[in-house]
Image (cartoon, rainbow, N blue to C red):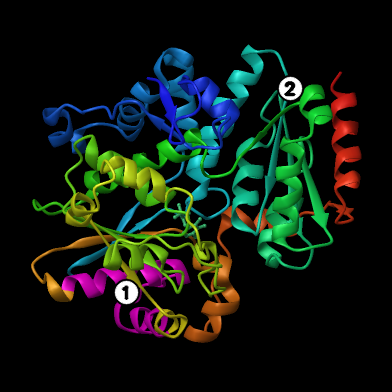
Amino acid sequence: MNYYSLNQQSPITDFRNATILGQAPDGGLYFPETVPVLNREWIRNLKNISREAIAYEVIRPYVGDTIPEDKLRTIVQETIDFPIPLKKINDSIYSLELFHGPTLAFKDIGARFMSRCLGYFAREGSRRVTVLVATSGDTGGAVASGFHNVEGVDVVILYPSGKVSSVQEKQLTTFGDNIHALEVEGNFDDCQKMVKQVFTDKELTSKMFLTSANSINVARWLPQQFYYFFALQQWPFAEAPVFSVPSGNFGNICAGLMAWKSGLPVKHFIAACNANDVVVKFLETDHYTPQKAVPTISNAMDVGNPSNFIRILEIFNRQSGEMKKVLSANTTTDDRTKALIKEVYKKNHYLLDPHGAVGFDALDHYLQKYPNDKGIVLETAHPIKFLDVVEPLIGENIPIPAAIADTLNKEQKATVLKNEYSVLKSYLLKIANSNL
Ligand SMILES: *Cc1c(COP(=O)(O)O)cnc(C)c1O
């Protein structure tokens, strides 16, 4: 399988290069030349196939011959070595719990797959790779956990001092070893700006092999298809489900659409958005107008210009009419999100996190119009990650899951960094020199 740049100004390349580069040299996102079509009989038989075999079958064509079969089977197996259960909330709404991985958010799946692929490519090329990532909270933890002790890879995480939650800071700063946490005296935009500057710095890029681990990387994006198949495996009805996907950068829902294009039976997709509603407006007006991100309580979806939306356009050959047959969108206020967390907990004894609650609202709206359908909300994070919001609403303490109890007791280690590019550069040069 080859990948082309959606800006059309870079040569096509294979999975290995697309993963190492992250983004095409022309600044475009990579997109596969063809979408594989899965065997219909195989899809009908999903319930009798192991999760590992499903995931392997789905990702194999995308990886091509850049990773040998036995190695890819191991990578897939390690990526999904935690449960992804489908739980009933009410008669027509189910929750696919994507938060049982090490950092309790769905980003674990993409980060674990990508880290293992990159580790493999680094060892093959016998060059140490340095992964640079700026985080506003969730991404850094998933990336740190995914890359911890992966041979041949160093990870440098920049996070804004005082602006991540205490659980998130623990997840960023307690790994040590090949994971370097930098606490930047600035905000998230400052962190992101410095990371971008690194990639244009000729001295650094000639001395070290740098890449980024953000969500546009094909190795983070494509494995997110896995759990749409796992959902179908557990789906108790004959009719295909509607998927409601809490969306920010639109990578997750875009992966679902790829799975559908490959033949997975899905009735409809709903992009569940908070106040950041660029795509909702696009579907109403056919005009795409990026906005400044608005802060909300479902903060992992506070994105004003979702980078993966262009991939969704590509899936539908830029025909918005075709897109609207399969995809709709909904926007939910913070007040409604809070009310729903309370209501669903009381009525259905199911605790949603703010992102899942936005997804629930979108699906609930849809089902009022189509009462014979049934659907699945992707529950993208564990409510404990947002305990400041959730606990006061339900008036109870949330028990701390075993996956993070350990992390919370570990010692934090971060290097405080002035918000100055030259300071970051000296730090990276030190890493470069120690790798010689
Ligand atoms: C990142 C994230 C999202 C948004 O996912 P996208 O792929 O960017 O649309 C939703 N919920 C949570 C908890 C997240 O961390």
**Which label belongs to residue 128?**
2
Image height check: is 389 above or below 161? below
User: What's the residue at 90%, 25% (across, down)?
Assistant: 433
Cα separation, mark 2 vs mark 1, equals: 45 Å
Q: Is residue 88 visible?
A: no
What residue sits 76% from the left and 28% below the top? 205
Magenta segment range? 339-367
- Amino acid type indicated by mark 1: Asp
Q: Which residue is mark 1?
A: 361
The earlier-in-sequence mark between 2 and 1 is 2
Q: Position of residue 310 (x, y in %)?
A: 40, 46
Magenta-colored segment: predominant secondary structure: helix
Q: Is residue 288 visible?
A: yes
* 132 drawn magenta: no
Q: Amino acid at mark 2?
A: Arg
Give me the residue at 42% from left, 13% from top. 65
